[in-house]
Image: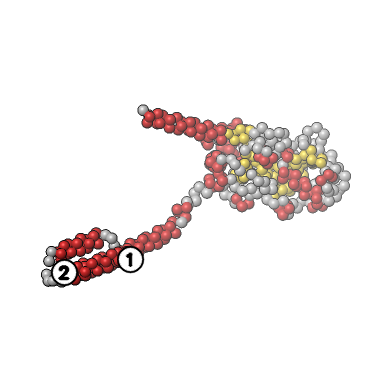
Amino acid sequence: MVLSWIKLGWAIVGLLALWGLVACSEEERELRFHPPAYQKIDTEALEEIFEARSGVQLTVAQVPVGMSGLEALVADKADLALIENSAPFTPGIRAVLPVYQSVLHLLVHQEFQPQSPKQPLKGASIYVADNSGAGRRVIDVVAKRQGLERDDYQFVSTSQGEPVDFILYFGPIDPDQPKWYVPGYELVSLGKRLNPQRESDPSGVGYIIPKMYAVTIPALTYDIPGNEEPIITVAADTLLAAQRDLSAQLVYELTKTLIEQKPRFLAVAPHLFSGITESFDPLELSFPLHDGARRYLHRDEPGVLERYAESINLLVYIIFLLLSAVVAFVRWRNHRKKDRIDTFYVRALGIREQAGGDNHEQLLAQLGELEQEAFQSLIGEKLAANESFRIFTDLLSRIRVELSQH
């Protein structure tokens, strides 16, 4: 009866533990994703792909208007977000995969007239779409080159209402009715209106802002004023980033789904997932690679046993040789002890052969000396306390009895 109650108790504990694991698993599988505001993304289609192919439930993160992806991750408002690779390292943030190339699109109001030709940013109002950190850094670098202080120009939170002088958008090239474009603005090269003293040569930007490089938007890519000619600008790779504490198994499945189901994602948003690849150098990322992504990318690499198979074989061979040497030494030592006990047998039998006269007292004394020598050898480990030694002591006892009868 008691045993039955114990079994029932363990069964209940097991069911509770299983329920807890299932509940935790379901809770952990819901990820809050912070999508870029100016991208045409069918979030429902993305959610369906993730849930069908990996069981991951992707939901849109609820964040304040204007909050960047990096800010959302740091504030724990999102589990996943898109961040330019040029962003400075931030503790607690990990990279998952590069997803696309973000290109700087610079729009200038067609009626903009700078206060100073050499300092076009002085007194200017600037709107940076999605509050992009990369866009702000470009403006700060250009302003510094113009000798301006931070108070000499103004970042605004929206492009609606009063027209602003500059609009900066960092994102993939997508000529299909861009949401970031506002009528009345012209798309220009980086040096043409923003930094006329360094006309159209942003190739050195990578030395100033790490991970950023010069690119050209071909002419007529956009049906926007100014793109009748090539637009020289800068770009940075955009990463899918996650919080460091996000489950490694969950990120593994997320990475697996993104890479293996890339054609499905391209059908939903080709401009947003075109850069997904597993052939990239993690050392070129501004953020450490998440453990879950690393496990997937290294999935085909040989394991520890495979990598060190030859060394392990050599070690096993050496151990086998050492064990063989030990066994051989033990056998040699035991055989040597056996040879020693044999000499005691011979001496005892020699004393026995001398019996028959009046010398039995002398023979008993010799027998006692022999016994004492044998025990001293046993204590000194020159003899083994085994069956051979027991036979020797029995032989001594029989010889004593025989000598006592004479």
> Where is residue 175 drawn, in percent x and y?
68, 39
**Going 61% across and 33% down the picture, which residue do you hit?**
59
Instruction: Looking at the picture, tell me which residue is in the foreground, 55 or 329.
Output: 329
Disc nearer the start of the sequence (1/2) = 2
Decide if residue 355 is in sight here: yes
| Pointer 2 residue | 360
- Reply above or below: 14 against 124: above
**Going 83% across and 51% down the picture, which residue do you hit?**
147
Which image quarter holds the C terminus?
Answer: bottom left
- Quarter of the image where one finds residue 165: top right
> Where is residue 187 drawn, in percent x and y?
76, 42
Find numbered disc 1 in the image and state the secondary structure of the residue it sits on: loop
Q: Residues within 10 Å of mark 2 (few under 14, many from 20)?
A: many
Side (left or right) of 357 relative to 329? left
> Where is residue 401 drawn, in percent x and y?
16, 62
- Reply above or below: 369 against 243: below
**Going 22% across and 62% down the picture, which residue do you hit?**
393
Instruction: Looking at the picture, tell me which residue is in the foreground, 320 or 332.
Output: 332
Estimate the spatial distance between the alpha carbons at disc 1 and disc 2, rounded to whole Å.
Answer: 30 Å
**Going 59% across and 35% down the picture, which residue do you hit?**
31
Find numbered disc 2 in the image and state the secondary structure of the residue it sits on: helix
What's the amino acid at mark 2?
His
- Quarter of the image where one finds residue 111: top right
Instruction: Looking at the picture, tell me which residue is in the foreground, 22 or 232.
Output: 22
| Pointer 1 residue | 380
Give the foreground label among 1 and 2: 2
What's the amino acid at mark 1?
Gly
- Quarter of the image where one finds residue 185: top right
- Reply above or below: 25 against 319: above
Side (left or right) of 214 relative to 400? right
Which image quarter holds the N terminus?
Answer: top left
Q: Residues within 10 Å of mark 1 (few under 14, many from 20)?
A: few
